[in-house]
Amino acid sequence: MLTDEISFIIVYRDIMSLHKLKSIFTVIKMKIEKLHYFESVARNKNFTKAAKECHIAQPAISHHIHSLEDELGTPLFIRNSRNVSLTPRGEVFYEEVVKILKAYEDAVMKTKFSSMYSKGKLSIGMYGFSSLNILDATVSSLKSKYPHADISFDRCQDVCYANYLLEGKYDVILAYVSPSLTLPDEIAFKAIRSCPFGVMIPKENPLSTKVSVSMSDIENSDSNVYILDTHTDYLARTSNIKSSRIKSEDDMELLLITGSLNRGIVFTTRHEAQEFRNSTMVFRELSDEGIMSSQGIYYLKDHNNWVLTRLLDYL
């Protein structure tokens, strides 16, 4: 019996709390609507136009403004037969009301979409990268704005990015652009960084003494050439370097390490060469038109992933 009474008291308390909460929200809504009416009249400088904009009868909006003035204990408008203007105190109130309405609208939007944002996921596959330096700042900003978004990273094992996206394994592929790659119509690409390839050369190689190096210099050299596998076919087609001399890796850091250990010529960018910081190698620009290094993200054009949409906005 006592248990039933306690249960009844708890249920009654919860019901009363819910009614109280609903009453509070009703009061808030009424107050906000009154501020909307005030803002509309102040902006339009006319009660008739404001009433039409707010879908309310003119006598009703006039009543709400009078009520607001009574609450504040001061007139907000100077009225005449044609239009109205704000009093000095009305101007002060108007500036604050605009801020309040904006904050209220932002709060409503965040509340409505908070459950959707908390469930957001983004799977990023990386090809050709050992680090996320190129996306660090962007992903950090995204996580700061949407801390509940689940963003994960994985290493791709195949240069065929399209299959990973079409099969749904990843939402995004971060990769170097392969000059030989033809993408299906369903896939889009957004560039993040683009610059020409130069070369890293061992200091003992005679080419290291040159200010810049030509493709002809590299073709006539005896050294093996190291390049990302995304560009192997392109280099073989567009140069006279023997295929037996062309070595490849699927990762830029591994490429630099392997090329350095084997004292070869490594195709890379100035930015990546600076990050590698190898004192036994020097970076040289290519004097003739070389191969471009472009990095960016691949994704499905027709996607419904809000985290991906935000990522694209940040890039």
Image: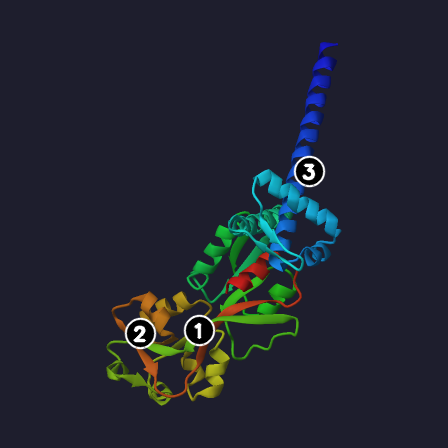
Does any portion of residue 119 appear in the rendered image? no
Amino acid type at image mark 3: Thr
Disc 2: which residue: 263
Label 1 vs label 3, nearer the camera = 3
Helix, strand or loop status at disc 2: loop
Using residue 26 as the reference point, say whether residue 130 is left or right of it: left
Q: Sequence-wise, which precedes: disc 2 or disc 3? A: 3
Q: Which residue is mark 1?
A: 248
Q: Which of the marked residues, 1 or 2, is nearer the chain's N terminus?
A: 1
For residue 268, side relative to residue 144 (left or right):
left
Expressed as whole percent of the image width and height from the top left, the position of residue 181 reads 56, 77
Q: Nearer the viewer, residue 28 or 281?
A: 28
Residue under pointer 3: 26
Q: Position of residue 87 (x, y in %)?
A: 54, 51
User: Is residue 260 in view from this perspective?
Assistant: yes
- Residues at badges 1 and 2 in contact (C-beta under 8 Å)? no
Q: Give amino acid for label 1.
A: Ser
Crowding at mark 3 (Cα within 10 Å: few <14, some 14-19, many 20+): few
- Distance of label 1 from label 2 (alpha carbons): 14 Å
Which residue does the image show at 34% across and 70% down from the upper left? 273
Q: Amino acid at mark 2?
A: Arg
Q: Position of residue 246 (x, y in %)?
A: 42, 79
Q: Are marks 1 and 3 in contact (CB under 8 Å)?
A: no
Residue at (25, 76) in percent of width and height: 203
Q: Is residue 149 left or right of residue 228?
A: right
Location of residue 44 in the rendering, given as x and y in whole percent from the top left corner? 63, 59
Q: Callout 2: few (<14), some (14-19), or many (20+) C-alpha neighbours within 10 Å?
A: many
Residue 54's image quarter? bottom right
Callout in the foreground (2, 3): 3
Question: In what element is the residue under mark 1?
Answer: strand
